[in-house]
């Protein structure tokens, strides 16, 4: 427990030693003169009067800081959880599984031709993705269609 | 099955190469020393199938359009 002055003391007397917070300089000019009205000059060390209150204020600030840290901790925890949830949702979206269709070769050929008829320019990858077909099957069918003269390279 | 033209150790070059594989590893870091510093390097693993992609169009539609 910190030592507190029990009473006012004159400047001329030996001052009671009281603790000073770390990093805080003891003021050498913390006295003021009172008693002008009564005609009795009395120098009083203001810092000694305020010292007990300063301790109370320090305690209160410490308590407030702790409460704030608790709140900040909770907010950080909440934000981290929110980001984790978003990340899981986004990863889930990017890892969406494309189910390849199992259709007959003839049907696949017709669908590829119909898709190319509707579009100006398509890549193998576009066709495979649009029709949800295996890339190798698409390449094979396109090669057949090219040989038949139904499909050609776009500019 | 489409004809396989490349064997182990061969290189494939093209503007667009479409691939199908089980795993892909790309650092996503540009490689310095190239003209635009945008070259990236990676690898594909597991039953890799590549095709040098090209834009395709229906010639049937073109013929109909001309008629």
Image (spheres, rainbow, N blue to C red):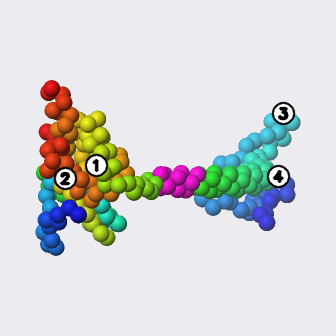
* Quadrant into which the C terminus of chain A falls: top left
Residue A90 seen? yes
Residue of label 4 = A8
* In the rendered image, residues at marks 3 and 2 fall on the same chain: yes
The chain carrying label 4 is A
Label 2 neighbour load within 10 Å: few <14, some 14-19, many 20+: some
Give the structural element (helix, strand or loop) at label 4. Answer: loop
The chain carrying label 1 is A
Q: Nearer the viewer, mark 3 or mark 4?
A: 4
Residue of label 1 = A109
User: What residue is rendered at 52% in x and 56% in y?
Assistant: A88
User: What residue is rendered at 80% in x and 59% in y?
Assistant: A4
The chain carrying label 2 is A
Q: In which quarter of the view is residue B61 placed? A: top left
For residue B12, side relative to residue A29 (left or right): left
Q: Which residues are magenta?
A: A82-93
- Disc 4 + disc 2, Cβ < 8 Å: no
Farthest-out residue, bottom: B8
- Disc 1 + disc 2, Cβ < 8 Å: yes
Q: Nearer the viewer, mark 3 or mark 2?
A: 2
Label 1 neighbour load within 10 Å: few <14, some 14-19, many 20+: some
Residue A72 seen? no
User: What residue is rendered at 66% in x and 54% in y?
Assistant: A74
* In the rendered image, residues at marks 4 and 2 fall on the same chain: yes
* In the rendered image, residues at marks 4 and 1 fall on the same chain: yes
Residue of label 2 = A144
The chain carrying label 3 is A
Mark toward the start of the polypeptide (1 vs 2): 1
- Distance of label 1 from label 2 (alpha carbons): 9 Å
């Amino acid at each position: 427990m910190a030592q507190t002055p029990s009473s006012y003391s004159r400047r001329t007397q030996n001052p009671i030693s009281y603790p000073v917070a770390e990093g805080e300089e003891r003021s050498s000019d913390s006295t003021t003169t009172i008693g002008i009205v009564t005609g009795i000059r009395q120098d009083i060390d203001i810092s000694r009067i305020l010292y007990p209150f300063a301790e109370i204020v320090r305690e209160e600030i410490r308590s407030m800081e702790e409460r704030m840290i608790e709140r900040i901790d909770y907010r950080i925890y909440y934000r981290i959880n929110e980001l984790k949830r978003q990340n899981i949702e986004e990863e889930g979206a990017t890892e969406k599984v494309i189910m390849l269709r199992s259709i007959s070769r003839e049907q696949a050929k017709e669908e590829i031709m119909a898709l190319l008829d509707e579009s100006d320019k398509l890549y193998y990858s576009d066709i495979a993705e649009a029709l949800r077909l295996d890339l190798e099957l698409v390449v094979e069918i396109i090669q057949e269609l090219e040989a038949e003269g139904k499909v050609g390279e776009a500019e | 099955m489409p004809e396989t033209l490349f064997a182990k150790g061969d290189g494939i070059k093209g503007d667009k190469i479409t691939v199908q594989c089980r795993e892909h590893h790309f650092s996503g870091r540009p490689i310095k020393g190239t003209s635009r510093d945008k070259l990236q390097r990676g690898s594909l693993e597991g039953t890799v199938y590549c095709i040098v992609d090209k834009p395709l169009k229906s010639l049937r539609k073109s013929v109909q359009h001309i008629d």
